Amino acid sequence: MNNQEAKLILQAYRSNGQDASDPFFADVLEQARRDPELQKWFAEEILLNTRLQVRLEAAIPVPSGLKANLLALRKTIRPVPWWFRPMNLAAAAVILLSLGIVLLLLPQKGAQIESFRETMARNSLQTEGHVVFESHDLAKIQQWLQDRGMESRFDLPTMLQSGTPQGCRVVDWDGHKATMVCFHLQDGQHMDLFVMDRTGLPDFPDNSAPQFASADGLMTTMWAKGGKLYLLTGQNQDDLEKVLQQTSTALKKLKV
């Protein structure tokens, strides 16, 4: 079974874990445990389903005593004439479908950005294989990226320019590829800078104003400039603000 077939089956898996012991899902769950890529997709799918369920429950709360009231009404209300039933069912189906689509589409913007932050934060926290190409020479790092078809020209905050690069790697996210460059600053801090082409990502910021948010225990700041999306990870917001505050108004552009 390939991953595409596995994903089709896993889409029917309930996020509350009720299907964990169902033999129907046994093989595909085992495949997800063995395959890091499928496991990552499955975790994001469960997260999205859980958020959608929470939104539905918040938007359509179930009144207390609903079951008892429905049973009581069943004894006193006449059966609905059959010729009304198809219309009512069709109308109810349209309303529920429309509500589901609206609730699913509304959070996509925030969910996509949050997914990007969390994925980059997990890569920043990864210790084994943190970087694929090790070098303290930024020019060599840029050349390695260029040889692999990645964008090697990007705007680097001034404080990072004075730090020591440790290496880089290419990170996959939702069909896009991002560059990660690891830095050790003069005060001993570790920060990772992620750079990704913003093309095809209309919901992401399109200006240089930094946006701060925590993800997986790290603080992140994200901004956009020159058609590229930047995300920097660090231990806290004060450290990230310090890096950005020491950046000149026009960030120095590094070229290979």
Image (tube, rainbow, N blue to C red):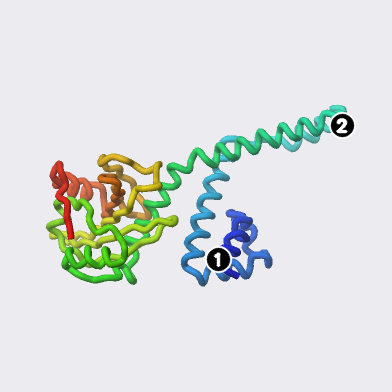
SS at badge 1: helix
Compared to 29, does 107 lie above or below? Answer: above
The Cα–Cα distance between marks 2 and 1, rounded to whole angstroms, is 46 Å
Image position of 177 (left or right of 45): left
Mark before the other along the chain sequence, 2 or 1: 1
| Of labels 2 and 1, the one closer to you | 1
Identify the disc placed on residue 59.
none
Residue 195 percent location from the top left of the image: 29, 54
Would you call the spot at circle 1 few (<14 residues within 10 Å), some (14-19), or many (20 or more)?
A: some
- The image quadrant of residue 185 is bottom left
- At 34% across and 48% down in the image, what residue appears? 198
- At 54% across and 67% down in the image, what residue appears? 32
Image position of 188 (left or right of 70): left
Image position of 18 (left or right of 112): right
Q: Please give the residue where the numbered disc 1 appears in the rendered image.
A: 3
Residue closer to the observer: 37 or 62: 37
Q: Please give the residue where the numbered disc 2 appears in the rendered image.
A: 82
| Callout 2 touching callout 1 (CB < 8 Å) | no
Residue 174 percent location from the top left of the image: 44, 55
Residue closer to the observer: 74 or 149: 149
Would you call the spot at circle 2 few (<14 residues within 10 Å), some (14-19), or many (20 or more)?
A: few
Image position of 44 (left or right of 64): left
Q: Split into 4 quadrants, where in the image is the N terminus?
A: bottom right
Q: Split into 4 quadrants, where in the image is the C terminus?
A: bottom left
- At 19% across and 46% down in the image, what residue appears? 244
- The image quadrant of residue 211 is top left
Residue 150 percent location from the top left of the image: 30, 60
Residue 55 percent location from the top left of the image: 54, 40
